[in-house]
Amino acid sequence: MSVAGFAPLEGVRVIEMSHMIMGPSCGMFLGFLGAEVIKVEPPQGDKTRDLTGMGRGFFPTFNRGKKSITLDLKSEEGRAALDKLLEGADVFVENFRDSSLAAMGFAPEVLRERHPRLIVASCKGFLHGPYENRTAMDEVVQMMTGMAYMTGPTGRPLRIGSSANDIMGGLFGAFSVLGALMQRTRDGEGHAIRVGLFENCLLLVAQHMVQFDIEGTEAPPMPERVFSWPVYDIFTTGDGRPVFVGAVTEGQWAKLCDVLGLDALKGDPRLQTRPDQIEARDWTLPIIEKAIAAQEFAPLIAALERDGIPFSPISRPAEMYNDPHVNRPGGLLSSELPEGGSYRAPGLPFEVDGGPAVPGSVDLPEIGADTAEILGALGLADEDITAASGQTRRHVA
Protein backbone atom coordinates (compact mmCIF):
# COMPACT_ATOMS: atom_id res chain seq x y z
CA MET A 1 0.00 0.00 0.00
CA SER A 2 1.44 3.38 -0.98
CA VAL A 3 1.28 6.45 1.19
CA ALA A 4 0.43 9.13 -1.36
CA GLY A 5 -0.57 11.66 1.31
CA PHE A 6 2.83 11.88 2.97
CA ALA A 7 3.82 15.43 2.05
CA PRO A 8 5.31 17.10 5.13
CA LEU A 9 6.70 19.98 3.02
CA GLU A 10 3.41 20.80 1.31
CA GLY A 11 3.12 24.59 1.09
CA VAL A 12 6.89 25.08 1.04
CA ARG A 13 8.17 26.81 -2.12
CA VAL A 14 11.69 25.95 -3.27
CA ILE A 15 13.51 27.88 -5.98
CA GLU A 16 16.26 25.70 -7.39
CA MET A 17 18.95 27.21 -9.61
CA SER A 18 21.44 24.41 -10.16
CA HIS A 19 22.64 21.82 -12.64
CA MET A 20 24.29 18.38 -12.86
CA ILE A 21 23.50 16.26 -9.75
CA MET A 22 24.24 17.70 -6.30
CA GLY A 23 21.90 20.70 -6.43
CA PRO A 24 19.17 18.98 -8.47
CA SER A 25 19.12 15.98 -6.13
CA CYS A 26 18.68 18.36 -3.18
CA GLY A 27 15.68 19.89 -4.93
CA MET A 28 14.29 16.49 -5.87
CA PHE A 29 14.43 15.19 -2.31
CA LEU A 30 12.55 18.28 -1.09
CA GLY A 31 10.02 17.89 -3.89
CA PHE A 32 9.46 14.23 -3.08
CA LEU A 33 8.53 15.36 0.44
CA GLY A 34 5.81 17.60 -0.95
CA ALA A 35 7.56 20.94 -1.58
CA GLU A 36 6.81 22.91 -4.74
CA VAL A 37 10.15 22.99 -6.54
CA ILE A 38 10.60 25.59 -9.28
CA LYS A 39 13.69 24.95 -11.37
CA VAL A 40 15.23 28.10 -12.84
CA GLU A 41 16.92 27.36 -16.16
CA PRO A 42 18.77 29.61 -18.62
CA PRO A 43 16.81 30.47 -21.78
CA GLN A 44 18.33 27.54 -23.68
CA GLY A 45 17.64 25.15 -20.81
CA ASP A 46 19.87 23.38 -18.32
CA LYS A 47 22.86 22.00 -20.24
CA THR A 48 22.53 18.78 -18.25
CA ARG A 49 19.44 18.03 -20.38
CA ASP A 50 21.72 17.48 -23.38
CA LEU A 51 24.25 15.10 -21.85
CA THR A 52 24.73 11.76 -23.54
CA GLY A 53 26.44 8.50 -22.65
CA MET A 54 26.83 7.98 -18.90
CA GLY A 55 25.39 11.47 -18.36
CA ARG A 56 22.10 10.64 -20.12
CA GLY A 57 20.38 9.69 -16.88
CA PHE A 58 21.45 12.76 -14.88
CA PHE A 59 18.66 15.17 -15.75
CA PRO A 60 15.78 12.67 -15.91
CA THR A 61 16.74 11.08 -12.60
CA PHE A 62 17.20 14.18 -10.44
CA ASN A 63 14.64 16.63 -11.84
CA ARG A 64 11.49 14.59 -11.50
CA GLY A 65 8.35 16.36 -10.34
CA LYS A 66 9.69 19.91 -10.67
CA LYS A 67 8.30 22.94 -12.45
CA SER A 68 10.51 24.79 -14.92
CA ILE A 69 10.91 28.46 -15.72
CA THR A 70 13.56 30.18 -17.80
CA LEU A 71 15.26 33.39 -16.73
CA ASP A 72 17.96 35.34 -18.49
CA LEU A 73 20.09 36.28 -15.48
CA LYS A 74 22.41 38.30 -17.70
CA SER A 75 19.57 40.80 -18.08
CA GLU A 76 18.30 43.25 -15.50
CA GLU A 77 14.76 41.98 -16.10
CA GLY A 78 15.76 38.39 -15.41
CA ARG A 79 17.54 39.25 -12.18
CA ALA A 80 14.62 41.39 -11.04
CA ALA A 81 12.20 38.53 -11.74
CA LEU A 82 14.34 36.09 -9.72
CA ASP A 83 14.46 38.52 -6.82
CA LYS A 84 10.69 38.91 -6.93
CA LEU A 85 10.30 35.14 -7.05
CA LEU A 86 12.49 34.79 -3.97
CA GLU A 87 10.27 37.23 -2.05
CA GLY A 88 7.61 34.55 -1.69
CA ALA A 89 9.93 31.55 -1.51
CA ASP A 90 10.97 29.54 1.51
CA VAL A 91 14.15 27.97 0.13
CA PHE A 92 16.70 28.86 -2.54
CA VAL A 93 18.94 25.99 -3.72
CA GLU A 94 21.97 27.00 -5.79
CA ASN A 95 25.32 25.61 -6.90
CA PHE A 96 26.93 28.61 -8.60
CA ARG A 97 30.47 29.74 -7.96
CA ASP A 98 30.55 32.19 -5.07
CA SER A 99 31.95 34.92 -7.34
CA SER A 100 29.29 34.36 -10.03
CA LEU A 101 26.46 34.50 -7.53
CA ALA A 102 27.87 37.66 -5.94
CA ALA A 103 28.27 39.33 -9.36
CA MET A 104 24.57 38.78 -10.02
CA GLY A 105 23.67 40.30 -6.66
CA PHE A 106 22.52 37.04 -5.05
CA ALA A 107 25.26 36.22 -2.57
CA PRO A 108 23.80 34.41 0.48
CA GLU A 109 24.54 37.31 2.83
CA VAL A 110 22.81 39.73 0.44
CA LEU A 111 19.78 37.46 0.12
CA ARG A 112 19.52 37.03 3.89
CA GLU A 113 19.40 40.79 4.31
CA ARG A 114 16.92 41.27 1.47
CA HIS A 115 14.72 38.27 2.35
CA PRO A 116 15.10 37.61 6.10
CA ARG A 117 12.98 34.43 6.14
CA LEU A 118 14.62 32.83 3.11
CA ILE A 119 16.71 29.68 3.61
CA VAL A 120 19.64 29.67 1.17
CA ALA A 121 21.09 26.22 0.52
CA SER A 122 24.38 26.48 -1.36
CA CYS A 123 25.73 23.22 -2.81
CA LYS A 124 29.47 23.75 -3.17
CA GLY A 125 32.66 21.80 -3.70
CA PHE A 126 34.12 22.80 -0.34
CA LEU A 127 33.05 24.48 2.87
CA HIS A 128 34.78 27.73 3.82
CA GLY A 129 38.51 27.26 4.21
CA PRO A 130 41.69 27.07 2.12
CA TYR A 131 39.97 25.15 -0.70
CA GLU A 132 36.69 27.04 -0.84
CA ASN A 133 37.30 28.50 -4.32
CA ARG A 134 38.59 25.31 -5.93
CA THR A 135 36.60 23.58 -8.64
CA ALA A 136 35.32 20.23 -7.40
CA MET A 137 33.69 17.23 -8.99
CA ASP A 138 32.72 13.86 -7.58
CA GLU A 139 35.90 12.30 -8.95
CA VAL A 140 38.07 15.12 -7.60
CA VAL A 141 36.92 14.73 -4.00
CA GLN A 142 37.12 10.95 -4.18
CA MET A 143 40.77 11.27 -5.13
CA MET A 144 41.42 13.94 -2.48
CA THR A 145 39.86 12.20 0.51
CA GLY A 146 41.21 8.69 -0.03
CA MET A 147 37.91 7.23 -1.24
CA ALA A 148 39.46 6.32 -4.61
CA TYR A 149 42.54 4.91 -2.86
CA MET A 150 40.34 2.65 -0.73
CA THR A 151 38.26 1.49 -3.70
CA GLY A 152 40.99 0.37 -6.11
CA PRO A 153 44.01 -1.85 -5.56
CA THR A 154 47.35 -0.30 -4.64
CA GLY A 155 48.55 1.99 -7.41
CA ARG A 156 45.18 1.98 -9.16
CA PRO A 157 42.84 4.41 -7.38
CA LEU A 158 39.28 4.05 -8.66
CA ARG A 159 36.23 6.20 -8.20
CA ILE A 160 33.18 4.31 -7.02
CA GLY A 161 30.73 3.35 -9.73
CA SER A 162 28.07 6.01 -9.25
CA SER A 163 27.75 9.72 -8.41
CA ALA A 164 27.30 8.75 -4.78
CA ASN A 165 28.98 11.86 -3.35
CA ASP A 166 26.87 14.23 -5.44
CA ILE A 167 23.68 12.42 -4.46
CA MET A 168 24.61 12.24 -0.79
CA GLY A 169 25.69 15.89 -0.91
CA GLY A 170 22.22 16.72 -2.21
CA LEU A 171 20.73 14.64 0.58
CA PHE A 172 22.73 16.57 3.19
CA GLY A 173 21.46 19.75 1.53
CA ALA A 174 17.87 18.60 1.92
CA PHE A 175 18.59 17.38 5.45
CA SER A 176 19.99 20.76 6.48
CA VAL A 177 17.06 22.58 4.82
CA LEU A 178 14.64 20.52 6.91
CA GLY A 179 16.57 21.54 10.02
CA ALA A 180 16.53 25.20 8.98
CA LEU A 181 12.78 25.08 8.33
CA MET A 182 12.24 23.70 11.83
CA GLN A 183 14.55 26.33 13.31
CA ARG A 184 12.61 29.05 11.46
CA THR A 185 9.44 28.04 13.27
CA ARG A 186 11.28 28.99 16.49
CA ASP A 187 13.22 32.11 15.55
CA GLY A 188 11.33 33.31 12.47
CA GLU A 189 14.57 33.73 10.54
CA GLY A 190 16.06 32.28 7.42
CA HIS A 191 19.52 30.76 7.39
CA ALA A 192 22.42 30.40 4.96
CA ILE A 193 23.46 26.76 4.52
CA ARG A 194 26.57 25.61 2.71
CA VAL A 195 27.05 21.94 1.85
CA GLY A 196 30.51 20.71 0.80
CA LEU A 197 31.05 17.85 -1.63
CA PHE A 198 34.56 17.32 -0.25
CA GLU A 199 33.36 17.23 3.35
CA ASN A 200 30.62 14.80 2.36
CA CYS A 201 33.21 12.41 0.89
CA LEU A 202 35.42 12.92 3.94
CA LEU A 203 32.58 11.66 6.13
CA LEU A 204 32.30 8.56 3.94
CA VAL A 205 35.93 7.62 4.68
CA ALA A 206 35.76 8.62 8.35
CA GLN A 207 35.87 5.02 9.59
CA HIS A 208 39.29 4.54 8.00
CA MET A 209 40.55 7.83 9.41
CA VAL A 210 39.38 6.90 12.89
CA GLN A 211 41.05 3.48 12.72
CA PHE A 212 44.35 5.24 12.03
CA ASP A 213 43.78 7.82 14.77
CA ILE A 214 43.06 5.14 17.36
CA GLU A 215 45.45 2.37 16.33
CA GLY A 216 48.07 4.18 14.28
CA THR A 217 47.57 1.71 11.41
CA GLU A 218 46.22 2.52 7.96
CA ALA A 219 43.49 0.39 6.44
CA PRO A 220 44.64 -1.13 3.14
CA PRO A 221 42.55 -0.63 -0.01
CA MET A 222 39.39 -2.71 -0.03
CA PRO A 223 40.67 -5.24 -2.60
CA GLU A 224 43.55 -5.95 -0.21
CA ARG A 225 41.69 -5.61 3.06
CA VAL A 226 42.46 -7.69 6.09
CA PHE A 227 39.34 -9.78 6.54
CA SER A 228 37.36 -9.67 9.73
CA TRP A 229 35.08 -12.50 8.59
CA PRO A 230 35.60 -16.21 7.88
CA VAL A 231 33.89 -16.00 4.48
CA TYR A 232 33.28 -12.72 2.64
CA ASP A 233 34.02 -13.49 -0.99
CA ILE A 234 32.80 -13.93 -4.56
CA PHE A 235 32.50 -17.46 -5.92
CA THR A 236 31.26 -19.05 -9.15
CA THR A 237 28.51 -21.67 -9.23
CA GLY A 238 28.49 -24.75 -11.40
CA ASP A 239 26.33 -23.03 -14.00
CA GLY A 240 28.76 -20.12 -14.28
CA ARG A 241 26.93 -17.58 -12.10
CA PRO A 242 29.06 -15.35 -9.82
CA VAL A 243 27.69 -15.01 -6.30
CA PHE A 244 28.85 -13.22 -3.17
CA VAL A 245 28.63 -15.30 0.00
CA GLY A 246 29.34 -14.16 3.54
CA ALA A 247 29.63 -16.05 6.82
CA VAL A 248 30.51 -13.61 9.58
CA THR A 249 29.57 -15.54 12.73
CA GLU A 250 30.20 -19.05 14.02
CA GLY A 251 26.52 -19.81 13.49
CA GLN A 252 26.60 -18.70 9.85
CA TRP A 253 29.79 -20.69 9.32
CA ALA A 254 28.07 -23.85 10.59
CA LYS A 255 25.00 -23.25 8.43
CA LEU A 256 27.13 -22.61 5.33
CA CYS A 257 28.97 -25.88 5.96
CA ASP A 258 25.59 -27.63 6.19
CA VAL A 259 24.38 -26.09 2.92
CA LEU A 260 27.57 -27.11 1.12
CA GLY A 261 27.85 -30.53 2.75
CA LEU A 262 31.17 -29.68 4.38
CA ASP A 263 30.77 -31.73 7.55
CA ALA A 264 34.54 -32.10 7.89
CA LEU A 265 35.03 -28.32 8.10
CA LYS A 266 32.11 -27.94 10.48
CA GLY A 267 33.53 -30.50 12.87
CA ASP A 268 37.21 -29.58 12.54
CA PRO A 269 38.51 -28.68 16.03
CA ARG A 270 40.75 -26.04 14.44
CA LEU A 271 37.69 -24.12 13.15
CA GLN A 272 35.38 -23.69 16.13
CA THR A 273 35.79 -19.95 16.73
CA ARG A 274 35.55 -16.99 14.39
CA PRO A 275 39.24 -15.96 14.89
CA ASP A 276 40.29 -19.52 14.07
CA GLN A 277 38.10 -19.55 10.97
CA ILE A 278 39.55 -16.21 9.80
CA GLU A 279 43.11 -17.41 10.39
CA ALA A 280 42.42 -20.49 8.26
CA ARG A 281 40.99 -18.64 5.25
CA ASP A 282 43.99 -19.51 3.07
CA TRP A 283 43.13 -23.23 3.12
CA THR A 284 39.37 -23.22 3.83
CA LEU A 285 38.37 -20.90 0.97
CA PRO A 286 39.60 -23.25 -1.78
CA ILE A 287 37.45 -26.00 -0.23
CA ILE A 288 34.40 -23.71 -0.10
CA GLU A 289 35.10 -22.50 -3.64
CA LYS A 290 35.12 -26.08 -4.91
CA ALA A 291 31.89 -26.91 -3.06
CA ILE A 292 30.06 -23.89 -4.48
CA ALA A 293 31.35 -24.75 -7.98
CA ALA A 294 29.53 -28.06 -7.61
CA GLN A 295 26.20 -26.32 -6.91
CA GLU A 296 23.66 -24.82 -9.31
CA PHE A 297 22.89 -21.15 -8.72
CA ALA A 298 19.11 -21.29 -8.11
CA PRO A 299 19.01 -24.04 -5.47
CA LEU A 300 22.13 -22.63 -3.80
CA ILE A 301 20.71 -19.16 -3.23
CA ALA A 302 17.40 -20.67 -2.11
CA ALA A 303 19.26 -22.62 0.56
CA LEU A 304 21.35 -19.60 1.58
CA GLU A 305 18.24 -17.44 1.93
CA ARG A 306 16.42 -20.13 3.89
CA ASP A 307 19.26 -20.37 6.41
CA GLY A 308 19.84 -16.62 6.75
CA ILE A 309 23.30 -16.62 5.21
CA PRO A 310 24.35 -13.31 3.56
CA PHE A 311 24.52 -13.71 -0.22
CA SER A 312 23.98 -11.79 -3.42
CA PRO A 313 24.14 -12.37 -7.15
CA ILE A 314 26.57 -10.02 -8.91
CA SER A 315 24.13 -7.82 -10.79
CA ARG A 316 24.33 -4.97 -13.29
CA PRO A 317 22.22 -1.82 -12.80
CA ALA A 318 20.14 -2.65 -15.91
CA GLU A 319 19.15 -5.96 -14.33
CA MET A 320 17.42 -4.13 -11.48
CA TYR A 321 14.40 -3.55 -13.73
CA ASN A 322 13.74 -7.30 -13.55
CA ASP A 323 14.36 -7.67 -9.83
CA PRO A 324 11.16 -8.71 -7.99
CA HIS A 325 11.96 -6.64 -4.92
CA VAL A 326 12.68 -3.52 -6.97
CA ASN A 327 9.30 -4.05 -8.65
CA ARG A 328 7.38 -4.07 -5.37
CA PRO A 329 4.76 -1.26 -5.04
CA GLY A 330 6.58 2.08 -4.95
CA GLY A 331 9.96 0.58 -5.82
CA LEU A 332 10.01 2.13 -9.28
CA LEU A 333 8.26 5.35 -10.25
CA SER A 334 7.25 5.92 -13.87
CA SER A 335 7.89 9.41 -15.27
CA GLU A 336 6.87 11.07 -18.52
CA LEU A 337 9.48 12.72 -20.73
CA PRO A 338 8.51 16.13 -22.18
CA GLU A 339 9.36 14.95 -25.69
CA GLY A 340 7.21 11.85 -25.25
CA GLY A 341 7.88 8.42 -23.83
CA SER A 342 8.49 7.40 -20.26
CA TYR A 343 11.16 5.95 -18.00
CA ARG A 344 11.34 4.31 -14.60
CA ALA A 345 13.55 5.32 -11.69
CA PRO A 346 13.71 4.37 -8.00
CA GLY A 347 11.60 6.21 -5.47
CA LEU A 348 12.55 7.22 -1.94
CA PRO A 349 14.31 4.47 0.04
CA PHE A 350 11.98 4.53 3.05
CA GLU A 351 8.44 3.58 4.01
CA VAL A 352 5.87 5.49 6.03
CA ASP A 353 3.25 3.65 8.05
CA GLY A 354 4.07 0.41 6.28
CA GLY A 355 4.00 1.70 2.71
CA PRO A 356 6.18 3.65 0.26
CA ALA A 357 5.93 7.43 0.25
CA VAL A 358 4.83 8.27 -3.30
CA PRO A 359 5.35 11.86 -4.57
CA GLY A 360 2.44 13.67 -6.16
CA SER A 361 4.24 14.12 -9.48
CA VAL A 362 7.42 12.64 -10.92
CA ASP A 363 7.15 13.80 -14.53
CA LEU A 364 9.98 15.73 -16.15
CA PRO A 365 9.25 19.38 -17.01
CA GLU A 366 9.70 20.85 -20.46
CA ILE A 367 12.12 23.79 -20.63
CA GLY A 368 10.28 26.85 -19.31
CA ALA A 369 6.90 25.11 -19.26
CA ASP A 370 5.76 27.03 -16.18
CA THR A 371 7.36 30.41 -16.89
CA ALA A 372 4.21 32.29 -17.87
CA GLU A 373 2.10 30.89 -15.05
CA ILE A 374 4.63 31.45 -12.27
CA LEU A 375 5.89 34.86 -13.36
CA GLY A 376 2.36 35.96 -14.23
CA ALA A 377 1.26 35.11 -10.69
CA LEU A 378 3.94 37.53 -9.46
CA GLY A 379 2.21 40.33 -11.36
CA LEU A 380 4.56 40.50 -14.35
CA ALA A 381 3.00 41.59 -17.62
CA ASP A 382 3.48 39.53 -20.78
CA GLU A 383 6.20 41.80 -22.14
CA ASP A 384 8.03 41.70 -18.81
CA ILE A 385 7.85 37.91 -18.79
CA THR A 386 9.27 37.80 -22.30
CA ALA A 387 12.15 40.10 -21.35
CA ALA A 388 12.91 38.29 -18.09
CA SER A 389 12.77 34.78 -19.52
CA GLY A 390 14.89 35.40 -22.59
CA GLN A 391 12.23 33.63 -24.66
CA THR A 392 9.94 34.88 -27.40
CA ARG A 393 6.32 35.58 -26.55
CA ARG A 394 5.42 32.35 -28.36
CA HIS A 395 7.48 30.28 -25.92
CA VAL A 396 6.02 31.74 -22.74
CA ALA A 397 2.42 32.21 -23.74
Image (tube, grey):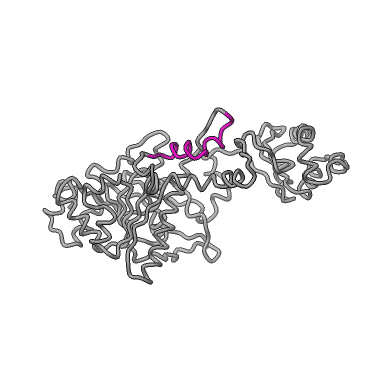
Is 314 left, or right, of 373 in this rendering?
right
Residue 246 horizontal side relative to residue 277, left or right: left
Q: Nearer the viewer, residue 213 or 323?
A: 213
Residue 89 horizontal/vertical position (percent): 28, 62
Camera sees residue 135: yes
Q: Residue furthest left?
A: 383
Look at the magenta stretch and give its main secondary structure.
Answer: helix
Choose top left, top right, bottom left or bottom right for residue 265. top right
Residue in the picture at 50% in, 36% down: 159
Is residue 6 highlighted in magenta?
A: no
Residue 150 in percent (x, y) is at: 56, 37
Task: Name which residue lies at 55% across and 27% down.
Answer: 155
Q: Which corner quadrant of the image does residue 19 belong to? A: top left
Depicted 367 relative to depicted 181: above or below: above
Residue sitting at x 16%, y 53%: 385
Q: Tell me, yes or no, if residue 36 can be seen here.
A: no
Task: Return the residue nearer the eye: 273 or 219.
Answer: 219
- The image shows residue 54, relative to residue 22, as above or below, that is above
Number of marks present in the image shown:
0
Magenta run includes residue 143: yes
Residue 133 location in percent, x, y?
34, 42
Q: Which residues are magenta?
A: 136-154
